[in-house]
Image (spheres, helix red, strand yellow):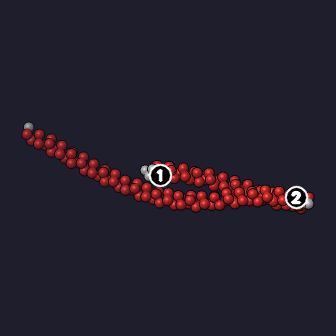
Amino acid sequence: MVTNINHATGDNNTSLTEGVTLLIEQEKKNIQHIDSLLKIIEDHTESIDIISQTISKHSTVIENLTNAVLDNTSKTEQIEKRLDDFVTKENHQEVMQGIDTLIKLAKKKDEELTMVTHGMKRMSDNITKLQEVNGLV
């Protein structure tokens, strides 16, 4: 009977050793996986920085476009006021066509500004999501 107990204890030790070995191997795999996740987070952090810089540049461009649209609108209004007093009907029509063209351009710039603003909002939301996913927030 003593040999059976020793034999059983030996089997338990072997099973325990195998279990510990499996746990160690799994832990090594977990560490490798964590390392790869950290690399991905590092790569995403760099991407987020680039996106942030791009958004900053776009903000400046949008601000400049907004100022240009406002300036053009103001100039157009001033031109219209002057035309009422100084232009013949034929000249007035030519000038009004030119003004219509300017207004169309200003509207187009305004639409582009709106689209860029929406794009930046989506980009900002995506950055926030990436930061949340990567635990940066």
Residue 57 image point, x, y percent: 58, 61
The residue lying at 18 percent from left, 43 percent from top is 12
> Crowding at label 2, few (<14), some or many (≥20) Cα neighbours within 10 Å?
few
Residue 100 image point, x, y percent: 81, 57
Identify the element where label 1 is drawn: helix
Res 97 visible: no
Callout 2 touching callout 1 (CB < 8 Å): no
- Which residue, given by chain and number where applicable, does mark 2 sit on? 85
CA distance for labels 2 and 1: 59 Å
Dividing the picture into quarters, in which one does residue 43 lie? bottom left
**Residue 62 relative to residue 9: left or right:** right
The residue lying at 30 percent from left, 51 percent from top is 27
Question: Which amino acid does the dot numbered 1 rest on?
Answer: Gln
Residue 13 image point, x, y percent: 17, 45
Point out which mark residue 131 bears. Answer: 1
In the rendered image, the residue lying farthest to the left is: 2
Between 10 and 97, the residue placed more toward the observer is: 97
The residue lying at 63 percent from left, 58 percent from top is 63
Identify the element where label 2 is drawn: helix
Res 3 visible: yes
Q: Single out the mark in the foreground, 2 or 1.
A: 2
Q: Quadrant of the N terminus?
A: top left
**Residue 10 relative to residue 84: left or right:** left
The residue lying at 85 percent from left, 61 percent from top is 95
Question: Which amino acid does the dot numbered 2 rest on?
Answer: Asp
In the rendered image, the residue lying farthest to the right is: 89
> Crowding at label 1, few (<14), some or many (≥20) Cα neighbours within 10 Å?
some
**Residue 117 relative to residue 33: left or right:** right
Between 58 and 35, the residue placed more toward the observer is: 58
Q: Earlier in the sequence, mark 2 or mark 1?
A: 2
Point out which mark residue 68 bears. Answer: none
